[in-house]
Image (cartoon, rainbow, N blue to C red):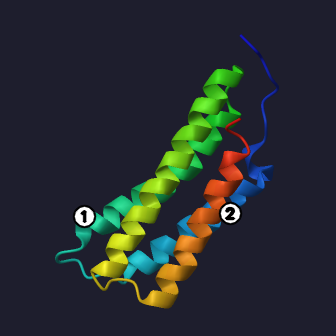
Amino acid sequence: MQERQFCDFRKLQVWIKSRSLLLALFNATATFPRKGSYDLTDRIRHDCLAIAANIVKACNKLAKTETTRFFKSAWQAASNLEEDLRSAQYRGLLNDPSYAQFAHEATVVKGMLAAYIK
């Protein structure tokens, strides 16, 4: 088993970016109507939290294989977020410019995460 040093997740640009996206989407979903969109609100918020949480978990593992597994989980959460954002746009909960901005940010986070999944 390969061992590595712990990393400080607070210094990782991918964690900083994911937290920024999380805060922006928590604010955006606060404007979603309660009736009929509650499940989507929860999914979007869960996706964002899962990205950041899995980055933190990855940094707290000594085994490279476990670190990679958590970065992959964060990447999958970002993929889920992309789909949930599309659903929010389709349902009229996000306008086109907001959708485009959030989708771009999710794609950037996925690209940053891909560097950790080698």
- Closer to the camera in the image, 23 or 63: 63
Rendered-image quadrant of the N terminus: top right
Q: Is residue 8 left or right of residue 24?
A: right
- Residue designated by label 1: 39
Whole-percent x, y for residue 36 in the image: 17, 75
Sort mark 2 into few (<14), some (14-19) or many (20+) by Cα contacts within 10 Å: some
Q: Among all residues in the image, which is located at the extreme top?
A: 1
Whether residue 21 is situated above or below residue 116 in the rendered picture: below
Residue 98 rendering spot, x and y as whole percentages: 50, 85
Q: Residue furthest front?
A: 118
Type of the residue with mark 2: Lys
User: Is 45 situated left or right of 105 in this image?
Assistant: left
Q: Total marks drawn? A: 2
What's the residue at 45%, 80% (across, down)?
A: 28
Q: Are marks 2 and 1 in contact (CB under 8 Å)?
A: no
Q: Secondary structure at mark 2?
A: helix
Q: Earlier in the sequence, mark 2 or mark 1?
A: 2
**SS for tag 1?**
helix
To which quarter of the image does residue 60 belong? top right
State the residue at coordinates (42%, 55%).
80
Which residue corresponds to mark 2?
Answer: 17
User: Percent from the top left, x then y, of residue 67?
Assistant: 66, 30
Q: Residue at x 71, y 54 (%)?
A: 112
Left or right? Give the position of 117 relative to 54.
right
- 94, above or below 88, in the image: below
Query: Which quadrant is the C terminus positioned in?
Result: top right
Identify the image quadrant of residue 3: top right
